[in-house]
Image (tube, rainbow, N blue to C red):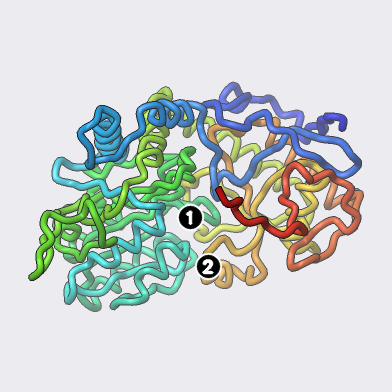
Amino acid sequence: MTLIEHRPFSDAPVAAATRGPLLPTVGRDLDVPVLGGDAVRYANFDWAATAPALESVVAAVTAALTGYGSVHRGAGLPSQSSTARYEVARATVGAFVGAREQDVVVFTRNTTDSLNLLARSVPAGAGDVIVLDVEHHANLLPWTAGPHRCLAGKTTVAGTLAALAAALDAAPAALVTVTGASNVTGELLPLDRVVALAHDAGARVAVDAAQLAPHRAIDLAASGVDYVALSGHKLYAPFGAGALIGRRDWLDAAPPYLLGGGAVHDVRDDGTDWLPAPQRHEGGTPNLLGAVALAAACDALCGLPAGALEAHEAALKDRLLAGLAELEGVSVHRIWSDSDEAIGVVAFTVDGYAPGHVGAYLSAEHGIGVRDGRFCAHRLLTRLGLPGGALRASLGVGSSAADVDRLLFALHELVGGRAHAQYGVVDGAWQPLDDDRDLSAWLPDTSAAPTGCRAV
């Protein structure tokens, strides 16, 4: 198999901020097979779905494994060490989002888990929960089991804020929960204005920061946001941990999220005394390695020079948008016509091609990974006139100008009619119809029946 490189799309000067990765990630030199028997360096544009682990995160996990023991449940030194690591990780994650002194950090599995916990913690009778139709399903579906109002989308930020103000005036609300950054288009709502509207009406604010946290600083104390939810797998720490951070009172009063050991003070014949948060909602053996990984990622991002992450991302996003604008038949999609800030997430479509077709082509012929589909935001995609989905190119700390140019060149070849293979839907997914790639090292052999465990 021969390693090949694709020609760049743009002759524009490469800014220093875009030349290479800001932080080293595992698999950054990954080679993937392409049609024709060759291989290329993988160009990752799917950071918004699951980001690879930082090398520093893996090092922190390896160190924790060396003295791994039970958290909060042992007298041995490994247990004491693991307990200390777990609680240091909790403090680190809290500091990463600017938690207030009385805020609590609850470790969860991911953002979805965090928001489901928060949904169970809203006091009964406190009022509705107000959500927007732009939300990822993680910040939409958990609220539907209780009193809630989903605001129909507006085409401008100004209109969206006006609709929110009207909804808060119309009836009491306990909570306004919004995305920090759209997982579809990367656009940001002005959280300071959302907080002001909600607090003036006596409501709290929760932010789904799954996309925001890897790209922008969060400060609960300074912003007044009451709760924030995030995921390690979006934050370069894919070890199965997330967190819900925010005001203690609701979480202390809520029913325990997961009934089990570690969440209780005393269990008797006549009842159970539950611990306050965070232990109240962390029943069972904690995910120490996930917590350590998440904290290590927070430390790494905090260690970047001031402004470096935003400058890196903005330069790459501008280069990508400028290139897409030059390609005939390629359309970039937005939620709000007057939004003026976005992270490095770009949604686009290619005239005449299903999103899945484009995604399969980019992977099979150019070794490029993008996301295609409806991004767990079905209501938004329908409102944007994209019921069949779109493509999403997302950037991260390992992205470079060379990656952007490769994506643009690949799309240039596609719209110019220079794709080399025919594509079709096979078993529900777009694929090259004559796929000569050797994928044996990548895909499991599903034809062999699983074997049982050998008796010992």
Please say if 120 is above or below 44. Answer: below
Going 67% across and 49% down the picture, which residue do you hit? 370
Mark 2 crowdedness (10 Å alpha carbons): few <14, some 14-19, many ≥20 = many
Residue 111 visible? The answer is yes
Relative side of 141 to 326, left or right: left
Going 56% across and 25% down the picture, which residue do you hit? 17
The residue nearer to you, when weighing 415 against 88, is 88
Going 41% across and 59% down the picture, which residue do you hit? 112
Identity, as a three-letter code, of the amino acid under mark 2: Leu
Q: Residue 433 location in percent, x, y?
A: 88, 59
Q: Secondary structure at mark 1?
A: loop
Measure the alpha-carbon separation of dots 2 and 1: 10 Å
Please say if 393 is above or below 350. Answer: above
Asked whether the residues under the numbered discs 2 and 1 touch, taking CB atoms below 8 Å apart as contact, a structural biologist would say yes
Which residue is tagged 1? 182
The residue nearer to you, when weighing 379 against 444, is 444
Which residue is tagged 2? 380
Residue farthest left in this picture = 270
Q: Residue 366 location in percent, x, y?
A: 79, 42
Give the image quarter of residue 441.
Answer: top right
